[in-house]
Amino acid sequence: MAIRPYRPKWRQGVLDLFALFTVPIVLLLAFYFVAIRGMEVGGGPKYQVTPLLIKTASYMLGGPASGAAAGIAALLAVASIYVVLVYLMFERDDRWIFYAVLIVAPLGLIAILLPVPLSVRYFMVSVAASLVLLSSGYAALLRRGVAGRGIGLTLLAVFVAGNAVNTGNLLRFGRGQYLAALRFMEKNSDGREVVITSDHDFRNGMLVNYYKRYLARPDSVRYANGVTLNEQGAEWLILHCFELTKRPARVADDYGNSYQLVSIYRYSDLSGWNWLLYHNLNRPLVPVQTLLSVVAVELDHAFTDVEF
């Protein structure tokens, strides 16, 4: 007696889908209309789509954020995803449809949200789905005899080493060395009050007011925004940036006060920003730091005055 697989009619299939997904969809719609609808992105750093996608794909395999190595890692990531999807198709494994949709659908948001600031974290669903997909291909590779296991173990070693470097940067710098910067300012201020200003009141003022609670004298730290800053200027000036491509040795505020770069405090990328710390030249000099977080100032910027 021949046994044929049970094939439900399409109507029954639709009813089964409704039975499985009605409750999650209703809850998702309720969450959207109650909590998400009307939310807007408050802003973010300027970006270019291609470098952003390269960074995302490179980080997925443990590669660097930029440069030629990031481009190579991104190409390997895209090629690997394509190969594994094709492999699942030839194996008549319908999971390739699931993975393809999860990986490609968020990328379609780029065309819709292009004017809105994007970042790597917006593609975490694609990254997670890609890693699960690649694990299927990796398991298939390990089953290809000694050669397959050798190639697989080599790829695993490269993957672990690359992620170890990125994780090391995260442990070293975190989302930013803001507390270390504030402790340096507290230690080297010439008066009882530590007056700080910056090039972005919302971003940096928020961090100063949050981290100052961990200082020895939190009540002595005051952030001066564009309204409260006077002609004497603040003792400390913070310039923030996402890439350390430009770091002038001297800058000037709206009142003509000059500030000297004394230290650079880094972050580990993806969340946060670098702090370039400047000291008012009208106050007693402080030593230029050579901490692990400091990047040397280029000689061609040594006597540059920049207004912020």
Image (spheres, grey):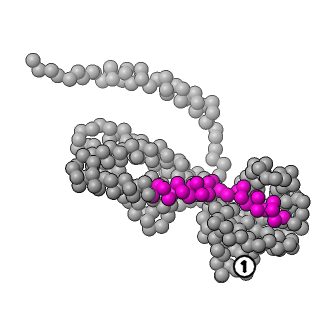
The x, y position of residue 292, in whole percent, is 63, 66
Q: Horizontal and vertical percent for residue 65?
A: 50, 61
Q: Residue 2's quadrant in the figure?
A: top left
Q: Magenta includes 171?
A: yes
**Residue 241 in the figure: left or right of residue 84:** right
Relative image position of residue 138 (x, y in whole percent): 32, 48
Place of residue 79 in the rendered image (x, y in percent of width and height, measured from the top left): 34, 55
Local crowd size for mark 1, using a 10 Å CA cut-off: few (<14), some (14–19), many (≥20): few
Task: Please name whichever residue, 293 or 21, is drawn nearer the observer in this view of the structure.
Answer: 293
Task: Give whichever of 58, 164 is nearer the camera.
Answer: 164
Q: Is residue 289 visible?
A: yes
Say which residue appears at 28% left-offset and 55% top-offset.
Answer: 150
- Residue at x 64% of width, y 78% of height: 298
Residue 292 is a magenta residue: no
**Residue ID at (49%, 46%):** 124
Visible in this render: residue 114? no
Q: Quadrant of the C terminus?
A: bottom right
Q: Is residue 145 left or right of residue 276?
A: left
Left or right? Give the position of 10 relative to 203: left
Residue that lies at the very extreme toward the top in this rendered image: 1
Looking at the image, residue 300 lies above or below residue 221: below
Q: Amino acid at mark 1?
A: Thr
Q: Nearer the viewer, residue 303 or 185?
A: 185
* Residue bearing mark 1: 304
Q: Is residue 152 left or right of residue 225?
A: left
Range shown magenta: 162-189
Q: Nearer the viewer, residue 98 or 222?
A: 222
Q: Up-down: is 256 above or below 32?
A: below
Q: Main secondary structure of the magenta part?
A: helix
Q: Residue at x 9, y 17 (%)?
A: 1
Tell me the element at label 1: loop
Vertical comparison of 259 with 192: above or below: below
